[in-house]
Amino acid sequence: MGDLLDRTVDFLFNKSDLIKPEEDENFDEKEIYKVAIIGRPNVGKSTLLNGLLGEEKAIVSSFPHTTRGPQDTLILYKNQPVLLIDTAGIRQKRKIGPGIEKLGVLKTLETIKKSDLALLVVDIFQDVQHQDKALAKIALKNKKSLIFIINKCDLEDNPELKLALPIITWAPRLFISAKQKKNINQILPLIKKIKENQNRIISQENLNIFLKKVILEKGWPDKIWEKIELKQKKFNPPEFELKTPKIFIRRKQIHQAQLNIIKKEMRRRWRFDGVPIEVSISA
């Protein structure tokens, strides 16, 4: 039994994916993956942070605006340094008071811009409001990855049918209970997967094969598309461009609808879940 206990302890220790860095452990700023926890007041952002950490790091209260500004917590998940940032909840603009609350909101917006990914937390019992849509738009405008976290789902029988989220189809949706710690173990693996999606580089050969397949399936004219090449412009987030003769651009022979089709097919082929991607035209 002693040997069994020793093996059990070793197994549990080695399987621990989330650990706290040593106090004197330093990381390059570029190594750290920044995750902003955003949402309206009192939707469970601080409770979610505590659940992820397994300790009462943030003050939790039923009284809104307990979190006045971003709180940073650095963790290691499978050797990846992740900075979790609990932000102040954002109310309607006309309700935001001067002083501390206004400063907290400004810091939250700045945090979104500096983050790599945003966890947008919503309450299953509160209808999606303007603030939720505005926060999603801010993340989208700044080309940030996004996950919808639908909280308090332990109190609802069919949470998937209850809530109409902002239409960002590429953002994953997790139904959780931060208080009961239900499904929060899925968040960090999903964050890791999205980071991989952000940094994906697709070879030129595979892009050529992909574009030819799309052209054939959609029946686009060969005399135009045989002179067009799809290239990856950058990653994190992934951006692609169609290298096109200038005359095609002047004549507007490539339409936005075709770019949307290419983006849709790229998501289907390479699973860019949680990540905004862009396809543009250049000569």
Image (spheres, rainbow, N blue to C red):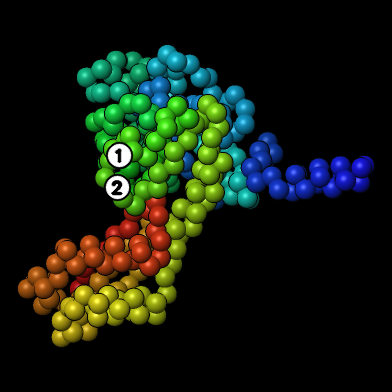
In which quadrant will I find the N terminus? top right
Label 2 SS: loop
Say which of 215 and 114 sits in front: 215
Q: Is residue 138 shown left or right of residue 12?
A: left
- Residue 66 sits in which quadrant? top left
Whether residue 239 is visible, yes or no, is yes
State the residue lying farthest toward the right: 2
The image shows residue 69, relative to residue 10, as above or below, that is: above
Q: Which residue is mark 2?
A: 168
Q: Specify the amino acid type for callout 2.
A: Ile
- Residue 107 sits in which quadrant? top left
Label 1 SS: loop
Where is residue 68 drawn, in percent x and y?
A: 42, 20
At a point 14% along the width and 67% down the height, the residue shown is 255
Say which of 228 and 283 sits in front: 228
The image shows residue 8, relative to residue 218, as above or below, that is: above
Say which of 239 and 14 sits in front: 14
Where is residue 242 drawn, in percent x and y?
A: 25, 72
Where is residue 149 drawn, in percent x and y?
A: 42, 38
Q: Residues within 10 Å of mark 2 (few under 14, many from 20)?
A: some
- Disc 1 from disc 2: Cα separation: 8 Å
> Residue 87, which numbered label?
none
At a point 45% along the width and 63% down the height, the residue shown is 200
Q: Residues within 10 Å of mark 1 (few under 14, many from 20)?
A: some
Where is residue 72 drawn, in percent x and y?
A: 52, 32
Q: Is residue 8 shown left or right of residue 72?
A: right
At a point 19% along the width and 79% down the height, the residue shown is 219
Q: Which residue is mark 1?
A: 165
